[in-house]
Image: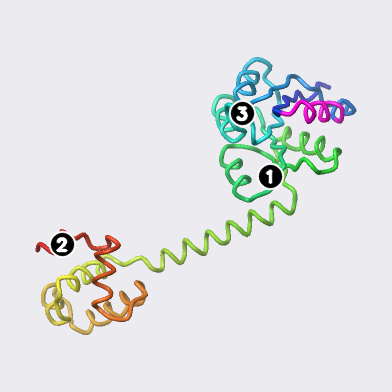
Amino acid sequence: MSKIKVLLADDHPLVRQGLKKVLSLESDIEIAAEAEDGEMAIELVGKVLPDVVLMDINMPNINGIEATRRIKQRFSDVQVLVLTFHDEEEYVLALMRAGAKGYILKDIDPSIVAKAIRQVYQGDCFFPPTLINQIMEKVNRDEKENHRDDENQLTKREQEILEEIVQGKSNKEIADTLFISEKTVKNHVSNILKKLDVTDRTQAAVLALRSGIVPIKELSG
Protein backbone atom coordinates (compact mmCIF):
# COMPACT_ATOMS: atom_id res chain seq x y z
CA MET A 1 0.00 0.00 0.00
CA SER A 2 1.37 3.43 -0.95
CA LYS A 3 2.25 5.81 1.83
CA ILE A 4 0.68 9.21 2.47
CA LYS A 5 3.20 11.80 1.24
CA VAL A 6 3.42 14.74 3.63
CA LEU A 7 5.06 18.12 3.14
CA LEU A 8 6.10 19.85 6.38
CA ALA A 9 5.89 23.65 6.23
CA ASP A 10 7.16 25.38 9.38
CA ASP A 11 9.83 28.01 9.92
CA HIS A 12 11.11 26.38 13.13
CA PRO A 13 13.62 23.57 12.48
CA LEU A 14 12.97 22.03 15.90
CA VAL A 15 9.25 21.75 15.15
CA ARG A 16 9.97 20.07 11.82
CA GLN A 17 12.42 17.67 13.46
CA GLY A 18 9.91 16.80 16.14
CA LEU A 19 7.19 16.14 13.59
CA LYS A 20 9.51 14.00 11.48
CA LYS A 21 10.40 11.93 14.52
CA VAL A 22 6.76 11.43 15.47
CA LEU A 23 5.56 10.66 11.94
CA SER A 24 8.48 8.32 11.18
CA LEU A 25 6.86 5.87 13.59
CA GLU A 26 3.81 5.62 11.31
CA SER A 27 4.13 2.92 8.65
CA ASP A 28 1.68 4.57 6.26
CA ILE A 29 3.12 8.13 6.33
CA GLU A 30 6.31 9.52 4.80
CA ILE A 31 7.82 13.01 4.81
CA ALA A 32 8.21 13.99 1.15
CA ALA A 33 9.75 17.43 1.72
CA GLU A 34 10.24 20.28 4.18
CA ALA A 35 9.64 24.01 3.73
CA GLU A 36 10.73 26.83 6.02
CA ASP A 37 8.30 29.42 4.66
CA GLY A 38 5.09 29.71 2.65
CA GLU A 39 6.83 30.56 -0.61
CA MET A 40 8.98 27.44 -0.42
CA ALA A 41 5.92 25.36 0.48
CA ILE A 42 4.11 26.45 -2.68
CA GLU A 43 7.18 25.71 -4.81
CA LEU A 44 7.75 22.26 -3.27
CA VAL A 45 4.12 21.26 -3.67
CA GLY A 46 4.56 21.65 -7.42
CA LYS A 47 7.70 19.50 -7.36
CA VAL A 48 6.82 16.62 -5.02
CA LEU A 49 3.00 16.68 -5.25
CA PRO A 50 2.33 15.63 -1.65
CA ASP A 51 -0.97 14.23 -0.52
CA VAL A 52 -1.07 16.43 2.57
CA VAL A 53 0.66 19.67 3.53
CA LEU A 54 1.16 20.16 7.26
CA MET A 55 1.12 23.95 7.35
CA ASP A 56 2.10 26.49 9.99
CA ILE A 57 0.35 29.90 9.98
CA ASN A 58 3.07 32.38 10.93
CA MET A 59 5.88 31.98 8.44
CA PRO A 60 8.09 34.52 6.64
CA ASN A 61 7.64 35.68 3.03
CA ILE A 62 4.18 34.16 2.60
CA ASN A 63 2.08 33.20 5.62
CA GLY A 64 0.25 29.91 5.98
CA ILE A 65 -3.16 31.30 5.11
CA GLU A 66 -2.04 32.80 1.81
CA ALA A 67 0.10 29.76 1.02
CA THR A 68 -2.91 27.52 1.61
CA ARG A 69 -5.06 29.61 -0.70
CA ARG A 70 -2.49 29.50 -3.51
CA ILE A 71 -1.84 25.79 -3.13
CA LYS A 72 -5.54 24.96 -3.27
CA GLN A 73 -5.98 27.16 -6.34
CA ARG A 74 -3.21 25.36 -8.24
CA PHE A 75 -3.36 21.87 -6.72
CA SER A 76 -6.93 21.18 -5.65
CA ASP A 77 -6.20 17.52 -4.85
CA VAL A 78 -3.56 18.42 -2.26
CA GLN A 79 -5.05 18.62 1.22
CA VAL A 80 -3.85 21.17 3.76
CA LEU A 81 -3.76 20.45 7.49
CA VAL A 82 -2.85 23.42 9.67
CA LEU A 83 -0.66 22.90 12.72
CA THR A 84 -0.36 26.00 14.88
CA PHE A 85 -0.36 27.55 18.34
CA HIS A 86 -3.29 29.80 17.41
CA ASP A 87 -6.81 28.70 18.29
CA GLU A 88 -8.61 32.01 17.65
CA GLU A 89 -11.78 31.56 15.63
CA GLU A 90 -10.65 34.22 13.12
CA TYR A 91 -7.67 32.09 12.13
CA VAL A 92 -9.82 28.98 11.86
CA LEU A 93 -12.40 30.68 9.64
CA ALA A 94 -9.72 32.32 7.47
CA LEU A 95 -8.02 28.98 6.89
CA MET A 96 -11.27 27.22 6.13
CA ARG A 97 -12.06 29.88 3.54
CA ALA A 98 -8.56 29.43 2.10
CA GLY A 99 -9.27 25.72 1.65
CA ALA A 100 -7.67 24.00 4.63
CA LYS A 101 -9.22 20.66 5.53
CA GLY A 102 -8.10 20.54 9.13
CA TYR A 103 -6.72 22.51 12.03
CA ILE A 104 -4.77 21.12 14.96
CA LEU A 105 -2.84 22.76 17.78
CA LYS A 106 0.86 22.19 18.42
CA ASP A 107 0.28 21.21 22.03
CA ILE A 108 -1.92 18.20 21.22
CA ASP A 109 -0.96 14.58 21.73
CA PRO A 110 1.45 13.55 18.92
CA SER A 111 -0.73 10.56 18.03
CA ILE A 112 -3.48 12.97 16.98
CA VAL A 113 -1.27 14.43 14.24
CA ALA A 114 -1.10 11.12 12.38
CA LYS A 115 -4.83 10.60 12.87
CA ALA A 116 -5.55 14.06 11.45
CA ILE A 117 -3.27 13.46 8.45
CA ARG A 118 -5.07 10.23 7.60
CA GLN A 119 -8.45 11.87 7.98
CA VAL A 120 -7.80 14.82 5.66
CA TYR A 121 -6.04 12.51 3.19
CA GLN A 122 -9.28 10.58 2.93
CA GLY A 123 -11.12 13.80 2.13
CA ASP A 124 -12.64 14.41 5.54
CA CYS A 125 -12.19 17.45 7.75
CA PHE A 126 -10.41 17.40 11.08
CA PHE A 127 -11.07 20.02 13.73
CA PRO A 128 -10.81 19.58 17.51
CA PRO A 129 -14.23 19.73 19.22
CA THR A 130 -13.30 22.91 21.11
CA LEU A 131 -12.53 24.69 17.85
CA ILE A 132 -15.73 23.42 16.26
CA ASN A 133 -17.68 24.88 19.16
CA GLN A 134 -15.91 28.22 18.73
CA ILE A 135 -16.66 28.23 15.02
CA MET A 136 -20.33 27.41 15.54
CA GLU A 137 -20.64 30.16 18.14
CA LYS A 138 -19.01 32.60 15.71
CA VAL A 139 -21.32 31.55 12.88
CA ASN A 140 -24.38 31.83 15.12
CA ARG A 141 -23.34 35.32 16.25
CA ASP A 142 -22.78 36.41 12.65
CA GLU A 143 -26.16 35.03 11.62
CA LYS A 144 -27.87 36.91 14.42
CA GLU A 145 -26.06 40.12 13.47
CA ASN A 146 -26.97 39.67 9.80
CA HIS A 147 -30.57 38.94 10.74
CA ARG A 148 -30.65 42.04 12.92
CA ASP A 149 -29.20 44.09 10.07
CA ASP A 150 -31.81 42.70 7.68
CA GLU A 151 -34.57 43.60 10.10
CA ASN A 152 -33.29 47.17 10.32
CA GLN A 153 -33.10 47.66 6.57
CA LEU A 154 -35.60 50.17 5.28
CA THR A 155 -38.01 49.01 2.61
CA LYS A 156 -38.20 50.88 -0.68
CA ARG A 157 -41.36 52.67 0.46
CA GLU A 158 -39.84 53.59 3.82
CA GLN A 159 -36.81 54.97 2.01
CA GLU A 160 -39.10 57.14 -0.13
CA ILE A 161 -40.95 58.42 2.91
CA LEU A 162 -37.71 59.13 4.76
CA GLU A 163 -36.55 61.23 1.82
CA GLU A 164 -39.77 63.21 2.07
CA ILE A 165 -39.26 63.63 5.83
CA VAL A 166 -35.82 65.05 5.12
CA GLN A 167 -37.55 67.56 2.83
CA GLY A 168 -39.59 68.64 5.85
CA LYS A 169 -42.94 67.44 4.53
CA SER A 170 -45.88 66.56 6.76
CA ASN A 171 -47.65 63.20 6.68
CA LYS A 172 -50.44 64.68 4.54
CA GLU A 173 -47.98 66.17 2.08
CA ILE A 174 -46.12 62.87 1.86
CA ALA A 175 -49.40 61.03 1.31
CA ASP A 176 -50.33 63.38 -1.53
CA THR A 177 -46.87 63.06 -3.12
CA LEU A 178 -46.76 59.27 -3.00
CA PHE A 179 -50.50 58.74 -3.64
CA ILE A 180 -51.07 56.73 -0.47
CA SER A 181 -53.26 57.32 2.58
CA GLU A 182 -52.12 59.49 5.46
CA LYS A 183 -52.66 56.53 7.80
CA THR A 184 -50.28 54.42 5.73
CA VAL A 185 -47.67 57.18 5.92
CA LYS A 186 -48.08 57.35 9.68
CA ASN A 187 -47.50 53.60 10.01
CA HIS A 188 -44.40 53.79 7.83
CA VAL A 189 -43.03 56.71 9.84
CA SER A 190 -43.40 54.69 13.05
CA ASN A 191 -41.48 51.81 11.48
CA ILE A 192 -38.76 54.17 10.25
CA LEU A 193 -38.26 55.70 13.69
CA LYS A 194 -38.05 52.24 15.22
CA LYS A 195 -35.53 50.94 12.68
CA LEU A 196 -33.35 54.03 12.96
CA ASP A 197 -33.65 53.94 16.77
CA VAL A 198 -34.70 57.61 17.02
CA THR A 199 -37.64 59.25 18.75
CA ASP A 200 -38.84 61.90 16.30
CA ARG A 201 -38.81 63.00 12.67
CA THR A 202 -36.10 65.61 13.18
CA GLN A 203 -33.68 63.01 14.58
CA ALA A 204 -34.58 60.70 11.71
CA ALA A 205 -33.79 63.41 9.16
CA VAL A 206 -30.49 64.32 10.78
CA LEU A 207 -29.42 60.67 11.02
CA ALA A 208 -30.48 60.03 7.43
CA LEU A 209 -28.26 62.83 6.13
CA ARG A 210 -25.35 62.21 8.48
CA SER A 211 -25.16 58.49 7.70
CA GLY A 212 -25.84 58.87 3.99
CA ILE A 213 -29.13 56.94 4.06
CA VAL A 214 -30.53 59.91 2.20
CA PRO A 215 -27.91 61.68 0.05
CA ILE A 216 -27.67 65.40 0.57
CA LYS A 217 -28.46 65.89 -3.12
CA GLU A 218 -32.02 64.80 -2.35
CA LEU A 219 -32.51 68.20 -0.71
CA SER A 220 -32.11 69.91 -4.03
CA GLY A 221 -35.45 68.61 -5.17
Position of residue 205 measured from the top left corner of the image (x, y, whole percent): 24, 71
Secondary structure of the residue carrying tag 3 is: loop
Which residue is identified by label 2? 218
Secondary structure of the residue carrying tag 1 is: loop
Sort mark 1 into few (<14), some (14-19) or many (20+) by Cα contacts within 10 Å: some
Question: What is the quadrant of residue 182 in the picture?
Answer: bottom left
Which residue is identified by label 1? 86
* Nearer to us in this view, 73 or 40: 40
Upstream in the sequence, badge 3 or badge 1?
A: 3
- The kind of residue on which mark 2 rests is Glu
Magenta residues, dominant SS class: helix
Sort mark 3 into few (<14), some (14-19) or many (20+) by Cα contacts within 10 Å: few
In this rendering, would 91 be left or right of 12? left
**Which mark is nearer the camera, 2 or 1?**
1
Upstream in the sequence, badge 2 or badge 3?
A: 3
* Residue 60: mark in rendering: 3
Position of residue 154 measured from the top left corner of the image (x, y, whole percent): 32, 67
Secondary structure of the residue carrying tag 2 is: helix
* Residue 47: mark in rendering: none
Where are the magenta residues, as a range? Answer: 12-22
Position of residue 207 measured from the top left corner of the image (x, y, whole percent): 29, 69
Any magenta on residue 13? yes
Q: How far apart are marks 2 and 3 (CA)?
A: 51 Å
Position of residue 217 measured from the top left corner of the image (x, y, whole percent): 15, 58
Q: Which residue is drawn at 57% across and 43% down?
A: 94
Q: Which residue is drawn at 27% across and 64% down?
A: 210
- The kind of residue on which mark 3 rests is Pro
Question: What is the quadrant of residue 47 in the picture?
Answer: top right
Sort mark 2 into few (<14), some (14-19) or many (20+) by Cα contacts within 10 Å: few
- The kind of residue on which mark 1 rests is His
Q: Which residue is drawn at 64% across and 23% down?
A: 41
